[in-house]
């Protein structure tokens, strides 16, 4: 069930990954950008990274079946300058905010932006990168 919901969010992001914007969206981790057999390719900026919580399931009844999925989607925008990271988050918000992912056999609520970090510089990497994180609530029954 985790993968089905994660994939549904990925489908929503497809339009911003194609020309003319061509925003790179990595899922789960930057390691997904290459296989262990291939050397890492130079990163292209700006880009986004999508991660999820463990997407816990609960029940609102005394019955033993857990059917409520209440998860979080973390979207990180990364750029060489502040404006690039902000642009990534804006592009992602333009497609995810209030969107309804389609998951077979589930009723999914519109995505809600529940938290956002400030866009900050990470000077521990070279070149320094700017990054910010938006957190979306993903709820389905």
Image (cartoon, rainbow, N blue to C red):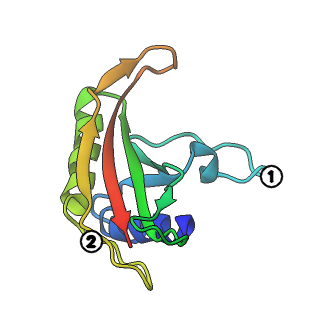
The residue shown at (42%, 55%) is 71
* Residue identifier under label 1: 37
Q: Can residue 69 be seen in this view?
A: yes
In the rendered image of this protein, does residue 100 appear above or below residue 97? below
Tell me if label 1 and label 2 are in contact, CB under 8 Å.
no
Percent x, y of residue 2: 54, 64
The residue shown at (30%, 62%) is 16
Q: Nearer the viewer, residue 35 or 74?
A: 74
In the rendered image of this protein, does residue 135 appear above or below residue 79? below
Q: In this view, does 41 lie to the left or right of 6?
A: right
Direction top: furthest residue:
123
Classify mark 2: residues with Cα within 10 Å, few (<14), some (14-19) or many (20+). Answer: some
The residue shown at (75%, 51%) is 38
Percent x, y of residue 112: 23, 55
Asked which quadrant contains residue 97, the reply is bottom left
In the rendering, which numbered label is found on residue 100? 2
């Amino acid at each position: 069930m985790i993968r089905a919901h994660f994939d549904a969010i990925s489908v929503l992001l497809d339009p911003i990954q194609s020309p003319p914007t061509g925003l790179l969206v990595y899922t789960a981790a930057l390691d997904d950008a290459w296989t262990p057999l291939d050397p890492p390719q130079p990163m292209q900026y700006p880009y986004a990274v999508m991660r999820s919580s463990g997407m816990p399931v609960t029940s609102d009844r005394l019955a033993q079946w857990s059917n409520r999925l209440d998860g979080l989607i973390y979207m990180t925008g990364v750029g060489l300058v502040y404006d690039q990271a902000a642009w990534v988050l804006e592009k992602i918000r333009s497609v995810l905010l209030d969107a309804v992912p389609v998951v077979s056999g589930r009723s999914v609520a519109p995505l809600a932006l529940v938290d956002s970090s400030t866009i900050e510089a990470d000077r521990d990497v070279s070149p320094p990168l700017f990054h910010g994180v938006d957190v979306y609530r993903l709820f389905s029954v």
